[in-house]
Amino acid sequence: MKKFLLSLIVACGFALPAAAAEEGYPWDKFPAEKMTDMASLQNGAKVFVNYCLNCHSASYMRYNRLHDIGLTDEEIKKNLLFATDKVGDTMTVMADPNQQKDWFGIAPPDLSVIARSRAETGKGGGADYLFTLWRSFYRDETRPTGWNNLVYPNIAMPHVLWQMQGERRAVFVDEKSEHEGGKAERRFTGFEQITPGTMSVREYDETVGDLVAYLQWMGEPSQGKRVRVGVGVLIFLGLLIVFTWRLNAAYWKTVD
């Protein structure tokens, strides 16, 4: 029961990225090449199902849509199908939304388009935001969950991937500001590793990149096909322009 309640806290914290400050810790660039890497998308789906789908639903996504990233029904049933027994079902959770709302004042929102929800902020894409968020957690004993985040200060959720990354402490220094009467301001200077994780820094960044790639793909599963069709149309128009130009030249050549 405690594990379930902790997962709900995670849901509520992760659900409110729009409340994070627009200014502050800079966002890192999400490795966009992962969007065309099937292995990355498949691993991202695995991480999503194991760490996010416990509380958040993805009701606009059906398990069988994972065929588009190269997974078979057998692979889906064996590795990803925990909340239902039908591959054609949507990605929902077992938790009752009404109970979640009673406990925490808000039901964890659907994550189907979480990456797209940050795409129009003017500061960067939703993928950049999520990629930086999951790599900016640090230990903070003053918080109820024991965790905080540089991108989303006072975040309500704990760091559910902490075993992979290990425990880190954020190092700050107080500096006097030239504004507001010279009040002291905290400036982040770096992380200090407390305990090692099961992954190296590079491995953890790769895993987070895979997760974000899947969240980005899930927001628009047809985007790959859309891009391919768009490229094909542009190539066709290019050839058509050349053909039309030569036809026009040949026609007017015969006209006195």
Image (cartoon, rainbow, N blue to C red):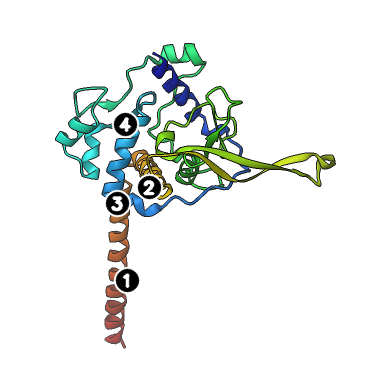
The answer for how far apart the CA atoms under marks 1 and 4 are is 48 Å
Report the residue marked by disc 1.
Answer: 241
Report the residue marked by disc 3.
Answer: 37
Q: Mark 2 or 4 closer to N-term?
A: 4
Q: Please name which of the two marks, 1 or 4, marks the residue nearer to the observer.
A: 4
Q: Quadrant of residue 240?
A: bottom left
Dot 4: what SS? helix
Specify the amino acid type for callout 3. Answer: Asp
**Alpha-carbon neighbours of circle 4 within 10 Å: few (<14), some, or many (≥20)?**
many
Dot 3: what SS? loop
124 horizontally vs 244: left or right: right
**Looking at the image, residue 234 lies above or below residue 93:** below
The answer for how far apart the CA atoms under marks 1 and 2 are is 47 Å
Numbered label attached to residue 30: none
Residue at 27%, 82% (x, y): give it. 250
Dot 1: what SS? helix
Residue at 39%, 52% (x, y): give it. 32
Residue at 16%, 39% (x, y): give it. 72
Numbered label attached to residue 203: 2
Q: In the picture, which quadrant includes the C terminus? A: bottom left
The answer for how far apart the CA atoms under marks 4 and 3 are is 19 Å
Report the residue marked by disc 4.
Answer: 49
